[in-house]
């Protein structure tokens, strides 16, 4: 891999975290798959040789548990969902170059080959460990066959993950107060011999790996704490029948842990694509200098930034260049849950008659990739009507319709210097955003270019020039057709169908997906047919109807809030807001109102942010609080992307005693919540310097 700016001369592979073959897809799942698809398309517009691969995660206890409940074999159960995913993803224009699954022969072979290599290189050893056992069912309880309490934060946890609390990976035997999900009875711990991967040997490598890693700040920074706390070796075998057999005669009827073979599917899927083509070398990517980028959910950062790169390094494979971790989709502030039917389902969205590109645009451009997005139909309507209908669609239709009615296509004139410069600026913005892994930025570049087009046509009023200044009118419309084409090229990674429709309307041949960014400045065809409107407004009545349905569903879910979720084993996004066991207890001592009034808390805006040399966690901030700009030192260096902080509104305790940290004076304290330093801000538009009271 390299850290050269895209496009590079090396082939690239983009992947997304595998979906469990265990249940319906919802918009929380789609956010990652659409984001990765848009990123791959954007790389290709830059001229990068890039493919997008993925596959269904067929193994693990979630599949085995649900298959057992339905009375079918795990393979049959998983394959049914796998085939459904193969049908669903294309309906959202998620265009995988190869979509396999972890139980196919390619992945079984590749997984066992990698494990044999790790064993040969001395990174695998045997160890006697405590494994949960159900004496009534007379069987060991791997992963999600056991539930209990997380030993780190006290939240409810499943056998291999604290998915309702700290989201930490848990080894067999770590869950406290274990209970069998098979019988509901308390489980007991018994000694059992298992295989371990010596992750602890890769601490120095992983530190260097994270130093070079691109992507989102949460994927780069969160793993550092796990390394500093001391890496634990990973148990890579399980006591169950469903999975890939441990290679070799000493496997003792064990199967490999699902998180061994799941990421290896990225390699296997690339192999399968290469077998069908003559111009893509999978080994150049995975064993050479190719570029590998993963888009994942925030809940599997540890697996992809610790376990996976250590496996790759130990087996002699190339490592990821970038890892981008998405935030969660919530509804009314609560995480999506399939068992509680608190979700907007992929099929439901399509059944409501909405075009997939509308959801692609909404999920891609609403907030940064790593931020949580609280979905509502009102917010969806606002984005579609305001940006796609009011800005992009309005400009496309009005400019092309005027061009058709007055010139039957593109007027015979040169693009003005002003417009050429503005399109070149948009192209440069797109290149920068793609290299920053920001699909939101790509979408904004397209929308802002369309906004410029609307302002340009309104400012020049060509309808007033056609009679008295026909050459000037032709010049203006020539510019507008060029802008329309440029917007389509820039927006194609996010709205491929709608961009293709515009491409066809202006008379271009072929597939817009094959066009590179430079095509945005190439002359459009001289003639084209009468255009149609490409986006339709979402009416208030429609939103009210959809909101009512959603509220009924959420209320029903709230009524079941206290019920057990032992059947919710499909890798849902956890609702950390309901896990209160890991919160600090409330202080017993109270303060009076007079004491509170002594705190001078102000609304501020971060103007500059940079790390302090020699300090692992500290950053120097310049915060504008209206009256003045304060220099503040904050322990957020590893928790936030400092380059993205300027312009962020914050809350500052202004009458803190000044302090000096690492030679830098701190004159105030910004307020943040939790271990992740979630910066407090204001909901409305309070003025800088406004007092919090």
Image: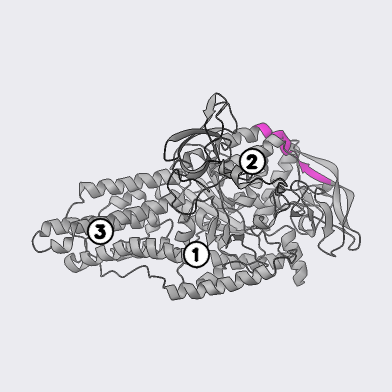
- Give the residue drawn at x 19%, y 69%: 405
Q: Is residue 53 above or below residue 127?
A: below
Question: Where's residue 185, x and y in %?
Answer: 87, 62
Question: 98 above or below 398?
Answer: above
Q: Quadrant of residue 67?
A: bottom right
Q: Which region shows up in magenta? A: 194-204
Give the labeled residue for mark 3.
481
User: Quadrant location of residue 231?
Assistant: top right
Tell us which disc is closer to us: 2 or 3. 2
2 or 3: tag closer to the N-terminus: 2
To which quarter of the image does residue 579 belong?
bottom right
Which element type, helix, strand or loop, lies under badge 1?
loop
Q: Residues within 10 Å of mark 1 (few under 14, many from 20)?
A: many
- Between circles 1 and 2, the one closer to the viewer is 2
Q: Is residue 484 left or right of residue 614?
A: left
Name the colour scheme: one colour
Residue 615 is left or right of residue 44, and the answer is: right
Residue 281 can be seen in this image: yes
Q: Which residue is mark 2?
A: 223
| Lower position in the chain sequence, tag 1 or tag 2 | 1
Q: Indicate the position of residue 636 as horizontal and vertical percent values.
A: 57, 38
Q: Position of residue 58 (x, y in %)?
A: 68, 60
Counting from the top left corner in percent of width and height, residue 379 is at 47, 63
Measure the alpha-carbon separation of dots 2 and 3.
Answer: 48 Å
Q: Is residue 134 above or below residue 151?
A: below
> Mark 2: which secondary structure?
helix
Q: Earlier in the sequence, mark 1 or mark 3?
A: 1
Q: Which mark is residue 92?
A: 1
Residue 677 seen by the camera = no
Disc 1 to disc 2, how far (Cα)? 32 Å
């Amino acid at each position: 891999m390299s850290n050269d700016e895209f496009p590079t001369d090396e082939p690239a592979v983009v992947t997304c975290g595998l979906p469990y073959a265990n249940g319906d897809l919802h918009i929380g799942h789609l956010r990652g798959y659409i984001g990765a698809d848009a990123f791959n398309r954007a790389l290709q517009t830059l001229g990068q040789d890039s493919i997008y691969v993925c596959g269904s995660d067929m193994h693990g206890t979630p599949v085995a548990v649900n298959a057992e409940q339905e009375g079918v074999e795990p393979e049959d159960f998983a394959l049914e969902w796998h085939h459904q995913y193969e049908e669903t993803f294309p309906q959202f224009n998620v265009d995988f170059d190869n979509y396999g699954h972890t139980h196919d022969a390619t992945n079984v072979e590749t997984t066992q080959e990698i494990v044999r290599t790790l064993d040969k290189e001395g990174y695998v050893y045997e160890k006697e460990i405590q494994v949960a056992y159900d004496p009534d069912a007379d069987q060991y309880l791997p992963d999600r066959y056991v539930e209990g309490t997380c030993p780190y934060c006290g939240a409810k946890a499943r056998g291999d993950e604290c998915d309702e609390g700290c989201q930490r990976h848990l080894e067999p035997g770590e869950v406290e107060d274990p209970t069998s999900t098979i019988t509901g009875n308390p489980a007991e711990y018994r000694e059992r011999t298992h295989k371990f991967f010596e992750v602890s040997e890769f601490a120095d490598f992983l530190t260097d790996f994270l130093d070079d890693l691109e992507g989102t700040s949460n994927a780069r920074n969160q793993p550092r704490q796990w390394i500093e706390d001391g890496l634990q070796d990973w148990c890579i075998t399980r006591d169950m029948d469903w999975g890939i057999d441990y290679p070799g005669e000493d496997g003792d009827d064990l199967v490999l842990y699902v998180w061994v073979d799941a990421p290896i599917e990225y390699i296997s899927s690339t192999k399968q694509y290469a077998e069908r083509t003559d111009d893509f070398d999978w080994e150049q990517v995975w064993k050479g200098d190719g570029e590998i980028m993963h888009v994942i959910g925030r809940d599997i950062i540890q697996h992809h930034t610790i376990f996976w790169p250590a496996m790759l390094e130990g087996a002699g494979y190339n490592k990821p260049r970038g890892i981008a971790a998405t935030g969660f989709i919530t509804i009314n502030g609560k995480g999506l849950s399939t068992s509680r039917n608190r979700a907007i389902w992929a099929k439901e969205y399509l059944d409501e008659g909405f075009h997939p590109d509308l959801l692609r645009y909404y999920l891609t451009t609403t907030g940064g990739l790593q931020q949580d997005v609280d979905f509502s139909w009102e917010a969806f309507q606002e984005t579609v009507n305001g940006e796609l209908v009011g800005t992009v669609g309005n400009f496309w239709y009005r400019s092309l319709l005027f061009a058709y009615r007055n010139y039957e296509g593109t007027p015979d004139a040169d693009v003005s210097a002003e417009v050429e410069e503005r399109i070149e600026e948009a192209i440069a913005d797109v290149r920068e955003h793609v290299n920053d892994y920001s699909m939101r930025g790509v979408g904004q570049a397209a929308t802002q270019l369309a906004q410029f087009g609307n302002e340009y046509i309104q400012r020049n009023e060509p309808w007033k020039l056609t009679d008295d200044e026909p050459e000037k009118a032709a010049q203006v419309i020539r510019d507008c057709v060029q802008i329309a084409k440029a917007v389509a090229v820039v927006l194609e990674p996010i709205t491929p169908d709608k961009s293709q429709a515009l491409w066809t309307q202006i008379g271009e041949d072929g597939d817009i997906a094959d066009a590179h960014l430079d095509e945005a400045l190439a002359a459009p065809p001289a003639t084209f047919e009468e255009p149609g409107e490409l986006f339709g407004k979402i009416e208030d009545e429609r939103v009210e109807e959809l909101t009512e349905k959603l509220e009924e569903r959420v209320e029903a879910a709230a009524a079941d809030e206290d019920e057990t979720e032992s059947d919710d084993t499909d890798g849902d996004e956890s609702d950390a807001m309901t896990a209160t066991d890991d919160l600090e207890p409330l202080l017993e001592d109270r303060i009076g109102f007079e004491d509170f009034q002594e705190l001078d808390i102000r609304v501020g805006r971060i103007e500059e942010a940079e790390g302090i040399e020699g300090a692992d966690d500290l950053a120097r901030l310049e915060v504008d609080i209206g009256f003045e700009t304060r220099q503040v030192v904050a322990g957020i260096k590893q928790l936030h992307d400092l380059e993205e902080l300027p312009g962020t509104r914050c809350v500052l305790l202004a009458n803190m005693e000044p302090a000096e940290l690492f030679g830098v004076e701190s004159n105030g304290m910004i307020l943040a919540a939790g271990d992740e330093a979630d910066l407090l801000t204001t909901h409305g538009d309070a003025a800088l310097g406004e007092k919090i009271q």
